[in-house]
Amino acid sequence: MHSEKFKLDFRTKMLMSLCLSYTLILGNIQTKFSIVAAAYSLLPYVFLLLNREKKAAVKGILFIMAAYIIQKEWVFSAGGFLGSLFLFITMMFLRLLPGFVMARFALASSTMSHMTSALKKMHFPVVLIIPITVMARFFHTARRL
Protein backbone atom coordinates (compact mmCIF):
# COMPACT_ATOMS: atom_id res chain seq x y z
CA MET A 1 0.00 0.00 0.00
CA HIS A 2 1.35 3.40 -0.93
CA SER A 3 1.73 6.06 1.73
CA GLU A 4 1.06 8.85 -0.77
CA LYS A 5 -2.22 10.69 -0.95
CA PHE A 6 -4.60 10.26 -3.86
CA LYS A 7 -3.17 12.24 -6.80
CA LEU A 8 -4.96 13.96 -9.65
CA ASP A 9 -3.84 16.83 -11.83
CA PHE A 10 -5.13 20.24 -10.73
CA ARG A 11 -6.77 20.77 -14.13
CA THR A 12 -8.77 17.58 -13.63
CA LYS A 13 -9.80 18.64 -10.14
CA MET A 14 -10.87 22.06 -11.36
CA LEU A 15 -12.88 20.56 -14.24
CA MET A 16 -14.54 18.06 -11.88
CA SER A 17 -15.44 20.86 -9.49
CA LEU A 18 -17.01 22.94 -12.26
CA CYS A 19 -18.93 20.02 -13.78
CA LEU A 20 -20.19 18.83 -10.41
CA SER A 21 -21.33 22.31 -9.40
CA TYR A 22 -23.00 22.99 -12.74
CA THR A 23 -24.81 19.65 -12.85
CA LEU A 24 -26.06 19.74 -9.29
CA ILE A 25 -27.08 23.40 -9.15
CA LEU A 26 -28.53 23.93 -12.63
CA GLY A 27 -29.39 20.39 -13.63
CA ASN A 28 -32.69 18.75 -12.86
CA ILE A 29 -31.07 15.44 -11.94
CA GLN A 30 -32.68 15.27 -8.47
CA THR A 31 -36.20 14.76 -9.77
CA LYS A 32 -35.60 12.09 -12.41
CA PHE A 33 -32.56 10.25 -11.06
CA SER A 34 -32.49 10.85 -7.32
CA ILE A 35 -30.16 7.92 -6.53
CA VAL A 36 -27.65 9.11 -9.14
CA ALA A 37 -27.90 12.65 -7.76
CA ALA A 38 -27.24 11.40 -4.21
CA ALA A 39 -24.24 9.41 -5.41
CA TYR A 40 -23.01 12.44 -7.35
CA SER A 41 -23.36 14.56 -4.20
CA LEU A 42 -21.27 12.00 -2.29
CA LEU A 43 -18.43 12.07 -4.84
CA PRO A 44 -16.43 14.95 -3.25
CA TYR A 45 -16.53 13.21 0.11
CA VAL A 46 -15.15 10.03 -1.46
CA PHE A 47 -12.26 12.12 -2.76
CA LEU A 48 -11.76 13.54 0.73
CA LEU A 49 -11.59 9.97 2.06
CA LEU A 50 -8.99 9.13 -0.58
CA ASN A 51 -7.08 12.23 0.49
CA ARG A 52 -7.12 10.95 4.09
CA GLU A 53 -9.41 13.63 5.46
CA LYS A 54 -11.62 11.11 7.23
CA LYS A 55 -13.33 13.39 9.74
CA ALA A 56 -14.59 15.88 7.15
CA ALA A 57 -15.55 13.08 4.77
CA VAL A 58 -17.57 11.14 7.34
CA LYS A 59 -19.39 14.30 8.48
CA GLY A 60 -20.22 15.17 4.89
CA ILE A 61 -21.43 11.67 4.06
CA LEU A 62 -23.69 11.67 7.12
CA PHE A 63 -25.09 15.12 6.22
CA ILE A 64 -25.74 14.03 2.62
CA MET A 65 -27.51 10.88 3.78
CA ALA A 66 -29.62 12.86 6.27
CA ALA A 67 -30.50 15.47 3.64
CA TYR A 68 -31.43 12.74 1.17
CA ILE A 69 -33.72 11.09 3.73
CA ILE A 70 -35.29 14.46 4.60
CA GLN A 71 -35.84 15.19 0.92
CA LYS A 72 -37.47 11.81 0.29
CA GLU A 73 -39.65 11.74 3.40
CA TRP A 74 -40.55 15.27 4.51
CA VAL A 75 -39.85 18.02 1.97
CA PHE A 76 -42.98 17.61 -0.10
CA SER A 77 -45.24 16.35 2.68
CA ALA A 78 -44.40 19.08 5.22
CA GLY A 79 -45.97 22.44 4.60
CA GLY A 80 -45.38 25.99 5.71
CA PHE A 81 -42.25 27.01 7.54
CA LEU A 82 -41.10 23.45 8.26
CA GLY A 83 -41.37 22.48 4.59
CA SER A 84 -39.41 25.57 3.57
CA LEU A 85 -36.73 24.82 6.16
CA PHE A 86 -36.40 21.21 4.96
CA LEU A 87 -36.22 22.39 1.36
CA PHE A 88 -33.46 24.89 2.22
CA ILE A 89 -31.45 22.25 4.12
CA THR A 90 -31.69 19.70 1.34
CA MET A 91 -30.80 22.21 -1.36
CA MET A 92 -27.75 23.36 0.59
CA PHE A 93 -26.44 19.86 1.28
CA LEU A 94 -27.43 18.11 -1.94
CA ARG A 95 -26.88 20.83 -4.53
CA LEU A 96 -24.61 23.62 -3.29
CA LEU A 97 -22.19 22.14 -0.77
CA PRO A 98 -20.70 19.34 -2.93
CA GLY A 99 -19.25 21.89 -5.36
CA PHE A 100 -17.59 23.77 -2.51
CA VAL A 101 -16.24 20.54 -1.04
CA MET A 102 -14.81 19.52 -4.42
CA ALA A 103 -13.11 22.93 -4.68
CA ARG A 104 -11.78 22.43 -1.15
CA PHE A 105 -10.39 19.06 -2.19
CA ALA A 106 -8.77 20.63 -5.25
CA LEU A 107 -7.08 23.35 -3.20
CA ALA A 108 -6.13 21.15 -0.25
CA SER A 109 -4.61 18.34 -2.29
CA SER A 110 -2.60 20.49 -4.71
CA THR A 111 0.65 22.27 -4.11
CA MET A 112 1.05 25.85 -5.22
CA SER A 113 3.62 24.89 -7.85
CA HIS A 114 1.29 22.26 -9.35
CA MET A 115 -1.56 24.76 -9.35
CA THR A 116 0.52 27.48 -10.99
CA SER A 117 1.95 25.16 -13.63
CA ALA A 118 -1.52 23.76 -14.42
CA LEU A 119 -2.93 27.26 -14.87
CA LYS A 120 0.01 28.16 -17.13
CA LYS A 121 -0.55 25.01 -19.20
CA MET A 122 -4.17 26.08 -19.63
CA HIS A 123 -2.89 29.41 -20.98
CA PHE A 124 -4.50 31.45 -18.22
CA PRO A 125 -3.34 35.07 -18.32
CA VAL A 126 -0.74 35.97 -15.72
CA VAL A 127 -3.14 38.69 -14.55
CA LEU A 128 -5.44 35.88 -13.32
CA ILE A 129 -2.78 33.37 -12.21
CA ILE A 130 -1.25 35.74 -9.65
CA PRO A 131 -4.50 36.53 -7.74
CA ILE A 132 -5.60 32.88 -7.81
CA THR A 133 -2.23 31.77 -6.43
CA VAL A 134 -2.25 34.48 -3.74
CA MET A 135 -5.79 33.49 -2.72
CA ALA A 136 -4.87 29.80 -2.56
CA ARG A 137 -1.76 30.57 -0.49
CA PHE A 138 -3.91 32.61 1.89
CA PHE A 139 -6.29 29.67 2.34
CA HIS A 140 -3.38 27.29 2.98
CA THR A 141 -1.91 29.68 5.56
CA ALA A 142 -5.24 30.40 7.24
CA ARG A 143 -6.01 26.69 7.49
CA ARG A 144 -2.74 26.01 9.33
CA LEU A 145 -3.33 28.74 11.95
Image (cartoon, helix red, strand yellow):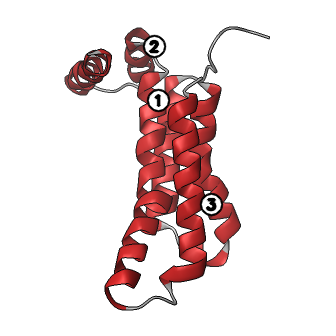
Residue 26 visible somewhere in the drawing? yes
Q: How far across and how far down the image is residue 45, in percent?
A: 57, 41
Q: At x 37% / y 82%, what residue is drawn?
A: 82
Q: Secondary structure at mark 1?
A: helix
Quadrant of the drawing holding the N terminus: top right
Residue drawn at x 58%, y 30% as measured from the top left: 54
Residue at 46 percent of width and 88 percent of height:
78
Q: Which residue is mark 3?
A: 38
Q: Quadrant of residue 87?
A: bottom left
Question: Badge 2, how many Cα within 10 Å: few under 14, some, many 20+?
Answer: few
- Please tell me whether mark 3 sits on a helix, a strand or a loop: helix
Mark 1, residue position: 106
Circle nearer the N terminus (3, 1): 3
* Up-down relation of residue 15 to residue 36 (above or below): above
Amino acid marked by disc 3: Ala
Question: Viewer-nearest of labels 2 and 1?
Answer: 1
Label whose residue precedes the other's in the sequence (3 or 2): 3
Measured in 3D between alpha carbons, the distance from the residue under mark 3 to the one under mark 2, in whole angstroms, is 31 Å
Q: Are marks 3 and 2 in contact (CB under 8 Å)?
A: no
Q: Is residue 125 left or right of residue 25?
A: left
